[in-house]
Every structure is written in C-alpha cells, then in structure tokens.
Amino acid sequence: MKRIALFAAMLLCGGVAAAQDQDGVIYDRLDSVVVSVSRAGKRTPVTYSSFGRKELQSSNPMNSLPMSLSLLPSVVTYNEGGTGLGNSAMTIRGSKGSQINVTLNGITLNDSESQEVFWVNIPSLSALLSNVQVQRGLGTSANGAGAFGASINMNTAFVGVEPSARLEFSGGSYNTFITTLSSSSGISDKGFYGSAAYSRGTTDGYIRNAFVRSQSAFVALGWLSGKNSLRLTYLMGDQHSGITWDGISLEQYAADRRYNGAGEYYDEFGNVCYYPNQSDNYSQHHLQLNYSRQFSDALSWTNTINYTRGDGYDEYYKTGRKLERFGFASPVTGTDGNPYTKSDLIYRKKMDNDYWVLGSSLKYRSGALSASAGVNLSDYRGAHWGENLFAKVLGDAFDYSSLDWYRNDGHKREASLFARAEYLITPSLNVYADLQGRLIGYSFTGKDDDWLEMGSNPADIIDYGNTWTFFNPRTAGPTALTQASPWATVNPAGPTSRRTSKAA
C-alpha cells in the first residue's frame, strides 16, 4: 500500500526527473548497443543532427514528430490541420517521405508498399522516444531501403536507475488537449525494469474537419545482467481524424482560409452540408523483442524480432459518382423506380497488414577502426478492399455487402545485408566504406480501386510478381575531419541530453 500511495503522490505532483539524466552508464548499455549500428558517429562522413530525451520532452507537446524536427537544417514540415495534431509530413533536402528511411529501434517503419511513414498513425511519438538522429543526404546503410534522401533513426530504449513518474497536461486553441502519463520502475537488484507511457490527444483543428481523436501507448519490460540485455517493447497508436488532404484553390483560400471541401454535398433544398465522418481511421501495434550481448568493450551483438499489425479505413461521402465504378450493375433502379447511372455514395477504403522482421547485427570499435555488419529478413502481407455503405438513389434497404468493388492482396519479402567500416588514418583524416545488398520479391493479385475506372473488364484480375536485386556501394575518403560549422549546435551535457548538429 505504501508503494501505491507513493506512486499516486508522484503522479499528483507531476512526477520527478528521470534518473538516467544523471547516469549515462545504463543509458549507453540500453541505447547505444541496441541502435548504434544504424547511427552516424563523429567521424562518419554523414551530415546529421541528434535530439536527446530532454529536447524531445521540451518540444511542443501538441506537435507530431515532424513538427518537433521542423527547425533542423534542411527540414521542411507541414501539418494539415493547423494545430500540430493530425496528418503531418516532412521533406529533407527536398526529398519526400518515400525517400526517407525511418527506423524505430533499428526496425524499418516505412510502409512496405507505399514506402511512406504516416506519422499520424503513431500519435505523440515524441513523448515516447529517448532520442532521434536525423541523417541528411545518402546516410548510412542499415535495415530497409537505402536512405537516398535522408534517414531518421529513433529509439524508445529508456530506463532510469530509480522509480519515476511524470504527468503532463497541455491545452491550446480550437479545443486542443493532450494528456501524457509515464512511469518507470527503476532497475531492481536483479536487473529487471519496466516503463510505460500513455498519451491521448484531441482537437477540433484550425481548418474545418481537421478534428483528431488519438491515443498512443508504450510498454517496455527488460532485464540487465552483466553484459546481457533483454527487452520486450510494445507500442500502440490509434487515431481517428478528419480528412484534410484535398487542398483548396487560391480563390477559396482568399475567401475563407479555414475552408475544407472534404465531405461537402447539397441537400434536396440546395443547402450546403458536410458529411460528419469524412475521416481517416487507423490502429497500429508494434511488438519487439531485443537481445543484446556485449562480448567486450570493442564488440557487441544485437538481435531483434518485430511484429507489426495495422488495420484501418478511410470513409468518404462523394457526390455524383458513376455506380459502375463502384461495382453496381449500372444502370440501377432507384427507390423512385427510375434508372440511374450516378449517385451520391458513402464508402470505405479498408486495409489490414502484417509485418514480420528479424534483424541481427555486430558492431566492433577499437582504436582507429569502427566496423559494423548486419542482416535483415522481413515479410509483409497487406490486404486492401472497398466497402460500399450507402447510395442515395438506393436508400438504406439495399444489401451493399453483396457488392464486390475491389479487393487485392500484396506480399513483399526482403533479405538485406550490409557492412560498414571507417578507419582513422590520422587524427584529422578518415576513410569510410559502406556496402548494402538487397533481394526483394513482391507479388500482387486482385483488383485495384481504379480498375473499373480505367475501363478494364470487371472479371479481369491483376496477377503480378517480380524479384529485384540491389547493390548499393558508397565510399568517402580520405576525408578531412574539421570542427563543426559556426551554425551547428553542440550540447555536450551528457549522453541523455545532447543535441548535436553537423553542417546542413
């Protein structure tokens, strides 16, 4: 009971500072060993910036991760709703999201089919991370696609020596509220620890229909013993947000800068109405098991098994759509007895997917030599299908579940390996080499959502499969090591509170 009372008191007081701010040893053992294989170091000829936990916690809690990184060199971000919550995106050096490789604890987050990371699907991510490194340009090879535009390496490894808790409330304009709760058990005498966090965010949005109802949760359970580290991590994101990506004309912007035409229609009296559930809905669950072994001061080995489950849908109200395009036997006989080839429709575009990853890597660093190598195996299966909910000319009595609009399944398998090394010839001269090989197989079968719109036979089925092999070599050097540029920010406060930036 005393422990429960103490925990409750800590929550009411807003928590205490996490102990890892004073103890870099635990942090390095959990963080550096686990994900440093994908990180650039001081000698690596890669332009990068790093955020520590303090910087992430001090950023605006309303912001998605892209918005928290918006002041970094060469980073351009935007938020569609205008409050920081909801759909956000970024470009780095002009490269769009599909050209940016994003990893979480060394596992690629990019969607296997679109190559994008949809940041809205993991709300309040900044509150769950211990550090982020953004590499601009080609970047280092690791898991997933080659980072030709940029790479973002994120880590959730976070544990304090002593128990801690934190409770945050944030509020803003347009009924924007965020609540975040986190706690850590500290490390027991036998090396066991646990930490958890939960965040919930809501907003009505600046523009019309930019509402967001989101939540995220994080749980980590681990064990440290000597040179061994075992950690189980669970990360959940769930979001229900209004569709805001349609865009408007300059004339509409001049008349009403908060205008958003998503879900707009006219009733029988000619009045403008808006469908209230023109929305994007998605849930994502990440489960990771990591084992790391420090063989010596120079050699470490880390292994990760990851499973990601995602499912969701977009819901639309569209006016004057061709019924044949959505699987109806056009023309249809409406409720008034007349034939129709077009109608206002309500429909959903649905999807679910399963993503398995197995990764293993070695890192060696001694004296002038730093080297790492790893292998990554992944399997992705994604299903997509359309679901009609309502047609205005047919009413509620029609059996919409009998329609086959579109349905397809994708299967992507990948095996990749990389080897990277850098050698310090002199204190100011460095050579670097990086090799990556990838074998990808992808197959797709079914009908796409625009299959009928393209004039294809409804009975036809897409059946496609192919295999690709990639070899991505890169080298640099000898490279002269110079001091950071005058506009770089360097904060040597410690391993958990550092924000370093090399030249843009």
Image: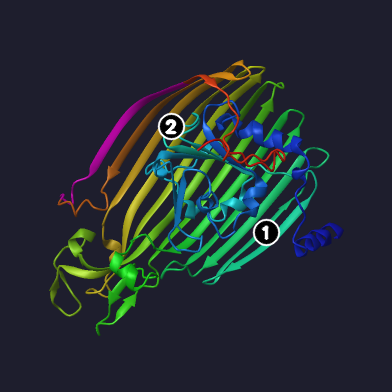
Residue 218 seen in render: no
Left or right? Give the position of 164 relative to 366.
right
Left or right? Give the position of 313 relative to 341.
right
Whether the residues at callouts 1 and 2 have beta carbons within 8 Å, the answer is no
Task: Depth check: give the residue in front, 297 or 96.
Answer: 96
Magenta-tinted stretch: 456-475
> Badge 2: few (under 14), some or many (20 or more) residues near its Cα, within 10 Å?
many
State the image coordinates of residue 382 (x, y, percent, origin top left): 39, 45
Amino acid type, mark 2: Gly
Alpha-carbon distance for marks 1 and 2?
36 Å
Position of the N terminus, as image quadrant, is: bottom right
Task: Depth check: give the residue in front, 9 or 146.
Answer: 146
In the depicted structure, whether residue 397 falls above or below residue 50: below
State the image coordinates of residue 424 (x, y, percent, origin top left): 60, 17
Magenta segment includes 311: no
Give the residue drawn at x 31%, y 47%: 408
Residue at numbered disc 1: 181
> Badge 1: few (under 14), some or many (20 or more) residues near its Cα, within 10 Å?
some
In the depicted structure, whether residue 152 falls above or below residue 365: below
Q: Quadrant of residue 241?
A: bottom left
The mark found on residue 146 in the picture is 2
Q: Secondary structure at mark 2?
A: loop
Amino acid type, mark 1: Leu
State the image coordinates of residue 66 (x, y, percent, origin top left): 50, 50
Task: Depth check: give the residue in front, 210 or 95.
Answer: 95
Left or right? Give the position of 484 relative to 143.
right
Left or right? Give the position of 319 relative to 195.
left
